Image: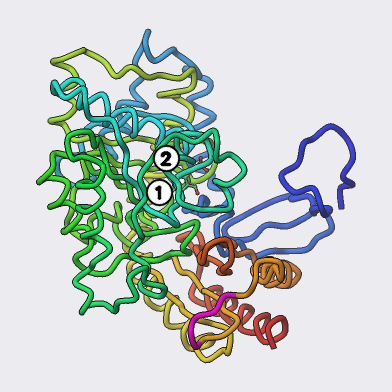
Amino acid sequence: MKQITGNLFPRIRDKQLPEAKSARGVWIEDSEGHRYIDASGGAIVVNVGHGRKEIAKAVHDQILSCHYAHPTMFTTPVVENLASALANHAPAGLQRFYFLSSGSEAVEAAIKLARQIHLASGKPERFRLISRWKSYHGLTLGALSAMGRTAFRVPYGPMLSEVVHIPPPYCLRCSYGLTFPACEIHCALALQEAIENVGPEIVSAFIAETVSGGTLAAYPPPDGYFKIIREICDRYGILLIMDEVMCGMGRTGRWFACQHSDVVPDIITIGKGIAGGVLALSAVGVRQEHFETLRKASGSFVHGGTFSHHPVAAAAGLATVGLLEKEKLVQRVARLGSDLGVKLKERLADHTHVADIRGIGFLWGVELVKEKKGKIPFPRHEKVAERVWDALFEKGVLVYKSTGLAGTDGDAFLIAPPFVITEDELTFVADAIKGVLENVLA
Ligand SMILES: Cc1ncc(COP(=O)(O)O)c(C=O)c1O
């Protein structure tokens, strides 16, 4: 264990963290020889497994050939090739990709890009963003303004910009007290009401995670949700931004999660696993027609960044896409994803404190409650998600915790393993979770 001394400003200040020494496949080993199965790929990042030689070689070769060339001075083949590779797998129309480093940066850029598309189209009055409660879009101030996770917003409340939030598709705790499908997806229709209230002529864009991830713990929308959203956006001339920073790049068993619903956004954001977690890389994808509008009107997007379009990060991204293709890993996620769901449900569904197990592909969430009837959450001060997480960590199983599903209360965790995990390892993870829940929440 490394002592909490020295000069590092650590992410966690109340306990000593083990030192990660090595990582291969789905396993991480610490300096004391303890092994951990990485059943969440860290923060849902390590999509193609730890220690991939193919990515290491691509990064190494790119550093030696050209590690940096400013994106307003040069283009590089690797960045061009990564954009083409993404366009190849993206829904028809999403043809242009702008590279940044983090998911938050991609969200910031997407919000600005929507505004700039309106400016270029002669609609300078459109600026207002609409988003959803219980969403996760990142922690920079623009992304945080869009985000709907109360506990993360409250400390910075006075500093956030005005974004209108509507209820999320979260049938377990429907904001309207309705039940799907009788509800006729009222939460999607709420977008129309919000637009009318705000003033349709000033709305720029609606941003939503295609599958709710970090806050709602892998909550896919009900069938038909995004079709309604798309239709409302089109009717009012509003751009649809689908945030796939967590759920894109094969995580749901399709290259892009929006391909499950056949809805094409105007703008898409991707990040996290795009470069396998080896280097910080994110991207904003936009429809060709909007790119053309922008090009004709002003020539460029008023945005930038020292590390945008970075060749070394792109090399890691291109090698990751190559592995997804060569090893057919997206198809593998589609094939094994429902098995993972079955394993979790078989072992956990009857537990007194498990309210729900939901997900898609390799993105699953288990939500915990104090009382199943009425879905009463544990009070936050009991720190249930943290206690379960700690006990799993002790057993060498890494999951990703999620809180704030019911105001500031609510406890859940995500299981989102690297795509290379074996079926036996999935069983091992599901068994371990069952054992821990029996102990911690007896
Ligand atoms: C949907 C979504 N958008 C944006 C972000 C922010 O990404 P980052 O943490 O890389 O800034 C996240 C991070 O979890 C996310 O899940």
Residue closest to the eye, 191 or 170: 191
Q: Characterize the local packing of mark 2: few (<14), some (14-19) or many (20 or more) Cα atoms within 10 angstroms.
A: many
Numbered mark located on residue 323 in the image: 1
Residue at the image point whose x is 42% and y is 38% from the top: 317
Magenta extent: 373-377
Q: Which residue is mark 2?
A: 319
Horizontally, residue 343 falls left or right of residue 37, namely left
Main SS, magenta region, reads helix
Q: Residue at x 46, y 41 (%)?
A: 275
Q: Position of residue 323 (x, y in %)?
A: 40, 49
- Report the amino acid beneath label 1: Leu
Element on which disc 1 rests: helix
Residue at the image position 51 percent from the left and 50 percent from the top: 45
How far is mark 2 from mark 1, CA to CA?
6 Å
Q: Is residue 106 magenta?
A: no
Q: Nearer the viewer, residue 316 or 185?
A: 185
In the rendered view, tell whether residue 86 sits above or below residue 12.
Answer: above
Mark 2 and mark 1 residues within 8 Å of each other at the beta carbon: yes
Question: Against 296, is 149 above or below?
Answer: below
Within the magenta stretch, is there residue 374? yes
Using residue 128 as the reference point, say whether residue 236 is left or right of it: left
Foreground pick, 428 / 147? 147
Give the percent coordinates (x, y) of residue 55.
49, 40
Residue 363 drawn at (x, y percent): 44, 64
